[in-house]
Image (spheres, helix red, strand yellow):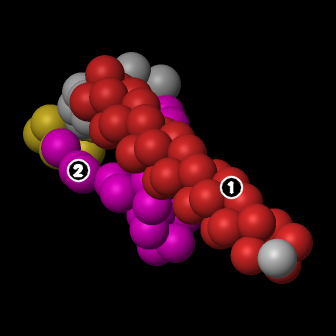
Amino acid sequence: MREVEGKMVMRYLDPRSSKVFDDPFFMLQQNDFIITRDRGYKNFMESTSQGLTVLGYLTSIASFATLITTTVLLVTNKK
């Protein structure tokens, strides 16, 4: 929020956009207010943790399948 010509003006800036640098509100001025939203860092960490857990399970299954396949091939080639 910034006072412009005696009125308080609020502007939303998307930090992911390349256009943010062209906005006059990008450069802070004295007495500007910055208001941020909680984007759920905890939720991000939980979803990342869940993703890594699934990845761990898939890696374990792939390793077990490789072990079984290798064992079967070794046993059948010895005959």
Q: Nearer the viewer, residue 52 or 67?
A: 67
Q: Nearer the viewer, residue 67 or 28?
A: 67
Q: Residue 40: image x %, image y %?
A: 25, 29
Number of marks: 2
Q: Residue 47: image x %, image y %?
A: 32, 38
Residue 78 location, quadrant = bottom right
Q: Residue 22: image x %, image y %?
A: 50, 69
Tell whether position 57 is magenta. no
Q: Is residue 13 above or below residue 42?
A: below
**Label 2: how many Cα within 10 Å (few below 14, some 14–19, many 20+):** few
Q: Nearer the viewer, residue 6 or 18?
A: 18
Q: Secondary structure at mark 1?
A: helix
Name the residue carrying label 1: 67
Mark 1 or 2: in front is 1
Residue 15 location, quadrant = bottom left
Tell whether position 22 is magenta. yes
Which secondary structure is most common in the magenta stretch?
loop
Q: Secondary structure at mark 2?
A: loop
Q: Which mark is residue 11?
A: 2
Provide the residue span drawn in magenta.
10-29
| Amino acid type of the residue that numbered disc 1 sits on in the rendered structure | Leu
